[in-house]
Image: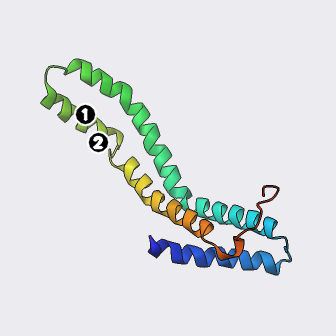
Amino acid sequence: MKVLVKPLTSFFMLIHSMLISMGISNPSWQYFLDILIFTLIIKLILLPLTIQQTKSSAKMTEFQPKFKELQDKYKNDPQKLQKKQMELQKELGINPMSGCLLMLIQFPIFIAMYEVIQNFPGFDGVPFLWLK
């Protein structure tokens, strides 16, 4: 996890210094804007993965009724059902592991983001906007 935390911390510090150089001196607003900008940029970087995951989910939604028909048709022959299921997945361009793989790629990044924000040294004891 440290492999991701160090570069993300450097990136977060860059955003923080840019805000300070822009004249934003209120620590609460710095904290708020740091997190907002940091999150937006990371989400933009992960956008292609999110789009791919959405497409995969749409294909699975299309797959479900067709698979239900196959289950009804081949309920007494599990081997034939499995073969037909694989053919249907191939026909629709579905990779059963793609949804999990995309989540597994994003998860460590979000955990690293949390660790960066949680352990950022400049924000100890700083109220967050109106919250104290």
- x 72%, y 75%: residue: 16
* Amino acid type, residue under disc 1 in the picture: Gln
Q: What secondary structure is marked by label 2?
A: helix
* Amino acid type, residue under disc 2 in the picture: Lys
Q: Are marks 1 and 2 in contact (CB under 8 Å)?
A: no
Q: Position of residue 29 (x, y in %)?
A: 81, 65
Q: Which residue is mark 1?
A: 85
Disc 1 from disc 2: Cα separation: 9 Å
- x 73%, y 68%: residue: 125
Disc 2 crowd rating (10 Å Cα; few below 14, some 14-19, many 20+) is: few
Q: Position of residue 87 (x, y in %)?
A: 24, 37
Check residue 121 in the rendering and tell me which mark sits there, or answer none: none
Q: What secondary structure is marked by label 1?
A: helix
Q: Position of residue 7 (x, y in %)?
A: 54, 77
Report the side of 64 relative to 85 (left or right).
right
* Foreground of the two, 126 or 7: 126
Q: Which residue is mark 2?
A: 90
Disc 1 crowd rating (10 Å Cα; few below 14, some 14-19, many 20+) is: some
Q: Position of residue 66 (x, y in %)?
A: 34, 26
Q: Report the quarter where the N terminus lies.
A: bottom left
Nearest to viewer (mark 1 / mark 2): 1
Report the side of 18 relative to 102 (left or right).
right
Up-down relation of residue 92 to residue 43 (above or below): above
- x 66%, y 66%: residue: 38
Report the side of 38 relative to 71 (left or right).
right
Residue 67 position by quadrant? top left
- x 35%, y 39%: residue: 92
Q: Report the quarter where the C terminus lies.
A: bottom right
Up-down relation of residue 52 to residue 61 (above or below): below
